[in-house]
Image: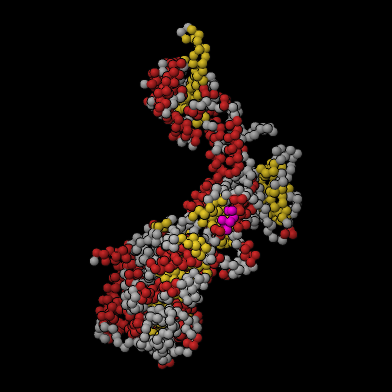
Amino acid sequence: MPIEITMPRLSDTMERGTIIKWHVTEGDEVTAGDVLADVETDKATMEMQAYDDGVVTGILVSEGQPVDIGTVCATLADEDDDGEAPAPPPVEVAAEVVAPAASAPAASPAPAARRSGGRRITPVARRLAEQHDIDLDALTGSGPSGRITKKDVLAAAQAGDEMKAAVPPSATPPAEPAPTTLAPPSPVEAVPATPVTSGELALHADDRREPVSGMRQTIARRLVQSKQEIPHYQVSMAFDMDAITDLRTSLNEELAQVEVKLSMNDLLVRACALAMSRNPLMNASWDGDAIVLHGRVHIGVAVALPEERGGGLVVPVIRDADRKSLRQISAETRALATKARERGLSPEDMEGATFTISNLGMFGVEHFTAIINPPNSAILAVGATAQKPVVRDGELTVGWEMQATLSNDHRVVDGATAARWLGTLKSLIENPSTILV
Amino acid sequence: MAILAGSARLKEPTFGRQETMTMAPSTPPGDHSTPAAADAAPDTQDTVHGPASAAAYGQQPRVVAPRPLNSTPPPDTLKQWLRDMMLIREFEIRSMQAYQNKLAGGFLHVYNGQEAVAVGCIGAAKHKDPVVTAYRDHGHALARGMDPKVGMAELFGRIGGCAKGKGGSMHFFDANNQMYGGHGIVGAQTPLGAGLAFATKYEDEVINGGDNTRVSLCFLGDGAINQGAFHEALNLASVLSLPVIFVIENNGYSMGTATARGTAGAGHLEDKAIGYDMCSTTIDGMDVITVWQAMKPLIDWCREHSKPALVDMQCYRFKGHSMSDPRKYRSHDEEHGWESEDPIGRLANHLTETGAMTADDIKAMGKTIRGEIRAAVDWAKASPEPGIEELHHDVYTDTWGPYTGTSLPEFMQRRASDRGNG
Amino acid sequence: MVREIEFRDALREAMSDAMRDDKRVFLCGEEVAQYNGAYKVSRGMLEEFGPRRVIDTPISESGFAGMAIGAAMLGLRPIVEFMSWSFSLVAADPILNNAPKMLYMSGGQLGCPIVFRGNDGAGGQLGSTHSWCVESLYANVPGLKMIIPSNPYDAKGLLSSAIKDDNPVFCLESERMLALKGDVPEEAYDIPIGKAVVRRPGTDCTIVSFGRPVHFAMEAAETLAAEGIDCEVIDGRSIKPLDRETIAASVRKTNYCVVVDQSWSFSSVGSEVAAEVHRLCFDDLDNHVHRVHNDDVPAPYAWNLEQEMLPNTRKICEAVRACTYNA
């Protein structure tokens, strides 16, 4: 009879353990007391010991794979087995999992190469998880050796749908699709307080340490670089939005028959682009010993990716926005936002911005500041357009108002330049017919 | 002990111990195709193939091969044969050279010494009679009319080869000349030979509703007669009454093993036919006139009666089994002893003795042939290697998966278009 | 007009139709003429076509297979009946070394339009030497095609296509199915070689099978349906060319695949299908392809052992459950 080596309980609170290193490999002879493996528990790294003499006939759990206490991790044949191969329990596991053989005698067969710590996920489960934006790391596999299967992913997808359905509507983003996708958290708060390279946070029992995606790493790196290198300062201004709100409403009534719907953001992109062409000093980049004045105006629009897709932030670019009509800007923005949400943007879609707009207005944010998106010299943080008590012509009245804050690179843009630019923008927004031509 | 003791073996060739045999009426059972054959009793069986009655076994005297002719073909024919044999010899010499220069790869089995067999047998046959042989096949293909260029290109693995460089030395095919290969497995071609005969007979009799008009020549080495396929083929040819002649090119060695060391009854191979109720004969295969004189009436008989025959064609292989054979199993004396039997020398002597050719004529002929083969080598060298697209071509006749259908080799396309133009 | 006839009659109709259409077609093999066929497949053919076209051969597979190949080289279109494919092993050289390679070795000069047909698979307590499943062994060889009908309708249509095909086609029949009855049109028709058919649509697991085990797969599908596993059963019809597309399309839908192959597992049709499914459907699989084969032992004589060895319904059910994580 084969001897089963199970995951031992190595601490009072331990429920699962992870073998972080096997010290034996198939074919090794072991004596009672030998250390078979190092096991990482909730508290510490412990040794898994052999209690019997015998030959290792199967390594059933790979390194890095957490398993419950009692899970068979390896099998031994005792001497009475007389070389008769014991029936290896789960065949797939036995065939696939081989421990590294640092201590294996030279004569024993070399273990098959195997990725360490990788989770077992079936191909279709991986594909479906991507489609449904399921975080595979959060799933527990129901298949052999914890393999995540289609069933697991579909169950998670269903659970996710149910959860979404249960959230009160007020918490969901506004109905207007384009602004929804353009919600860009590029806030200061996104930058970790500690250096991003640090990985040594003390974990508390309720904490969970989630490895970050490549995108998250890029965001972190670039924004830290921006915040550290660029001398930021901010200039804010309030905008009377009555006229532009009316204009948008009437334009959309006109355009409804051709199924075009302009968002406030589309109008803002156009206005910013025109403001740029009238203030070329703003459309510039710091280049060490020179300032590069860009001949064309490419407006980046920060887009937040949905949480189900792992979140994150991308900045698709509307090229030559000063030369494009509102309808063109609207169509391109929508297309890029959809692409970003569904398939991901290609590098070309995100290259070459000379200025960036970040809009959190749809979340009700009235005011915030944004970090410059290098190599831009400025970024406009746009708040919500909301009804406010305002003074118009000396009278206190209720009007639509928006606050926007321009972050600038002081190496390139001085305060007066920034103020002039905001003034231009204000003039364009408050006399919106000018942005139509 | 080697069965071949110098050239003495063939000094006085015998033709099947005729004195011990009688003209026999025993017809292989199931002969339906030769009504009232002159030298055969009427077939009493109703069907093509039913087993002969037990009473017939062992009792009946054998069908005997017709006597060899005494006549000699006209000088022009003999000159042509001399030319054919010299062409084969020169082709083989250049093949060996090319092999050693690595222009040809794989295995190479040359025909030097056995030229009279292919030339004499094929000279006695009609062009419409199918020929099939084993892997020592260059001589048969050339005797059948294959262009030496096409053969050489095949040896070199070039697209201009008879099989586009896909068959090599052992697989020479020329369908237009009724040359059905070139087969690499010892003995495997013997059932194919029976099949060719089956097909010609079937075409002539079943499809066209006439009499059998063709005889198939199936050549094999003495090594092949211990293969099961050979015996199965003989049996089938006999019970189905197929017009095929199995010509054992008995060169004394099955690869490197003297025939007697591997074959029971090696001294009288034609007796293998006895068990199959088949007529047989033994022929001196080193003399093309003798070959023709014996084969011509035999082929005619097989054609007329639509029956098979077996021939022990005694000959000698001047070179080794293949290019890697050091010939340690036989003595230099033995080899030298056979040099005087060289079929080319024998025919040349005959032609000069009869005044049909002078020594200078023969010399000039040799020169022409050398030029022709040199041109063939040059042509083959210039022929490109098959394109990689050929790899998946000719596997299936149709197109599917990686397969791209089939097409005729260049030389047959050329010929087809020539015909079209003519 | 469609009638219900036996598998063996369907085979005979295909042969007879072809022989009426084309004088180059003939049938040869052991007992095919006077005896009316060892399994009565060629019953009545001698009477219709005469002894020159329906030819009894001696028990001499290597000889008559080779002879038929020689005839095909010259342009005839032989049908060679092996009483059993088990007996074809002594003809391995002609059927594997000559027929499938003739076209290639001759550089396209001459092919080999020939059909070899006969019983394949366990006949029923015949012991190991007579219970060969040659599909995996022979399908390995380039240049040949292989069909394996599972019912009378397919038998007629596939064999008819095979006889018209200009390449060597191996037709694998089953002694256990010769008496199987099914609806078959009276008129001649062809079923294309290389096209599979979905015998039973389903959503939960694809079962791919060939020949007789298709019936076991269908039985298994019914059993599994009762358990809530809705299987799609594909009848490959041909082994070579293998209809990868039909199989892949099904697996992309179900995400699971079980292949049922009556030959032995090592280097088999089953392993080929599995490899192709893994290649074509890698991102659609929720489990590796599961395979059901003959057990890897010589076919036993004892009835119970033989039944246990075959790819039976129970084994198929177990494989489907395991594959779909329902074990």
- Taking the magenta stretch, the answer to whether it contains residue C220 is yes
At 55% across and 48% down in the image, what residue appears? Answer: C203
Q: Which residues are magenta?
A: C216-222
Q: Tell me the quarter of the image containing the N terminus of chain A.
A: bottom right
Q: Nearer the viewer, residue B418 or C172?
A: C172
- Colouring rule applied to residues: secondary structure
Q: Nearer the viewer, residue C69 or C23?
A: C23
At 69% across and 50% down in the image, what residue appears? Answer: A74
Callout count = 0
- x and y percentages locating residue C292 in the rendered image: 58, 57
> Taking B59 as reference, is B95 left or right?
left
Looking at the picture, does residue A208 appear above or below residue B118?
above
Q: Is residue B300 visible?
A: yes
- Taking the magenta stretch, the answer to whether it contains residue B174 is no
Q: Is residue A28 visible?
A: no
- x and y percentages locating residue A310 in the rendered image: 56, 34
